[in-house]
Amino acid sequence: MSSLRRLSLWRIAPILFSFWVVTTISSASSFAAVLPDQTLVFCSEGSPAGFDSAQYTTGLEFSAASYTVYNRLVEFEHGGTKVEPGLAERWEISSDGLTYTFHLRHGVKFHTTSFFKPTREFNADDVVLTFERMFDSNNAFRKAYPVQFPYFKDMGLDKSISRIEEPDPYTVRFTMKTVTAPFLSELAMPFASIISAEYADQLMKAGKASDINLYPVGTGPFIFVSYTKDATIRFDGNPDYWKPGVVRVSKLIFSITPDAAVREQKLKENECQVISYPRPQAIASLESDSQLKVPHQVGFNLGFLGYNTTHKPLDRVEVRQALDMAINKKAIIDTVYEGAGQLATNPMPPTQWSYDKGLRDAPYDPGKAKDMLATAGFPNGFEISLWAMPVQRPYNPNARLMAEMIQADWEKIGVHARIVTYEWGEYIKRAHAGEHDAILIGWTGDNGDPDNWLGVLLGCSSVNGSNFSKWCYQPFEALIQKGRATTDVSSRTDYYTQAQEIFKQQVPFTPIAHSTVYQPMRKNVTGFKIDPFGPTQFWNVGMN
């Protein structure tokens, strides 16, 4: 039993449920698999800030840790959005929607590494620690390594979960204070990756709790070996992985290559077999190479310009409306996305259910925008910082160029923008702290639920997390809370439609574009599927 567990472990008698049962998809194997003696190299776009999935919100960390080292209670199907069994082989939901009971898979092994040798298999202790660490501010491991858990808080789980119970070593029960419609999908997200309570104990005793962010241990398809910042991350295939057939290479290497042109050249020379985020102008050349293939699909994403509404004069809606109206979004789409993007008007993509098709942008009108600023008391404009991301993302292939174009647009109305950038980890850290005025950022949906856009990007509970606009507006917030508290899709759609209309009037951020996602790779790569939620996964991926 983990020493990190609460003294009162809630050993409770079974209760009756009206439930849905999800059948198991496989049993954990008792025998190590023989993996193909192959090494797959992925040219990634940047260095992850760390490997502790619970404290991050970006695809860099999700690709490098969440979907390599870890598993979750439930998973999204490979390349899809359907929730299927993970470390929980089945689950039950009570008739009132407040109790979730998960029955855990037996025989699942944690990784054996140079820095950790497990003495037991995965069980309920690990699940309880994973979530109590986020849920309970008095949790010992949380106190030993005090970090933020933005996703957990952004989605309101710190308030909606009432208790977490362990009836037996292979059962975990969550009781909610209110109906939380997206809960099951949220548990499939990276922040819910299950950590080892035994490993946490070891780190605590050694006084090195923070090492969980440097040396990850999980149950996933790949075992962490080493990380050299700005150079490589090395993984071994997991021969003991509980789901047969998923691991198809013996070694996986992330070759960190920030320059997209260099990534493309490495791919052509077979130094990498898969790369991230090609330049839009390079797509035709990559597609014409007989040794390559470039699968693509419409991205479930949004690139936007956030206004820090806690900074003056951006706290005034008429100022935000003027800045929004002064941006020539069509020119940005044509120049930055080069045909691989479509104009965004809503705070979510058109493929998201509850998307309001009736919303329209204010017309691009610098003259009217300048008049609005004068009426607001700024006839000579003002100065502002404009943050530009240092990395390519699915939703923004060239943030620096976009920033320069917005800078020129705002100059026409007397607003002088100073472009600022930082290394990616520092950029996100400072943005969470609210140092920016205006910021280029974006989002790729995580779970297919509208709350993942409206609640996480714009909700009051996420103002210190992924709500980079720091916008807390009670009429909007009330609709988001109502949307979470019912499972009726029609009612939720009505709430979210109203919320989108408020968003459009208040302009906490300017939606810019939704992009097409391209995933170039060598032709001999097999089994790869583009993840609709953004991270690059190597489940079922091999080479001929």
Image: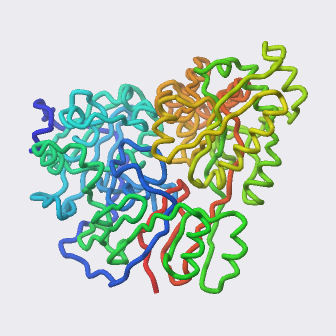
Q: Residue at x 79, y 39 (%)?
A: 408
**Above/below status of 250 relative to 60:** below
Q: Is residue 536 above or below residue 166?
A: below
Position of 280 with respect to 273 (left or right) is: right
Relative image position of residue 104 (x, y in whole percent): 24, 52
- 284 left or right, relative to 538: right
Colouring scheme applied when the structure was drawn? rainbow
Q: What residue is rendered at 61% in x and 18% in y?
A: 475
- Viewport quadrant of the N terminus: top left
Answer above or below: position of 154 versus 443. above
Q: Is residue 516 left or right of residue 487?
A: right
Figure quadrant of residue 344: top right
Q: Point out residue 449 in the picture as x, y percentages from the top left corner.
A: 54, 42
Up the image or down, 289 lies above or below 424; here it is: below
As drawn, which residue projects farthest toward the right? 367
Which residue lies at the image location 81% right of the left edge and 32% below the top edge? 325
> In which image quadrant can residue 85 be found?
bottom left
Residue 285 in the image: state x and y as whole percent: 70, 76
The reply to whether residue 530 is visible in this rendering is yes
Which of 16 and 379 lies nearest the eye of the viewer? 379
Q: Is residue 250 left or right of residue 516?
A: left
For the residue pair 140 and 24, the one nearer the viewer reads as 140
Front-most of residues 403 and 139:
403
Q: Is residue 108 visible?
A: no
Return the x and y of residue 191 as percentages of the image width and height: 38, 45
Instruction: Give me the residue at 27% from left, 65% from top.
Output: 225
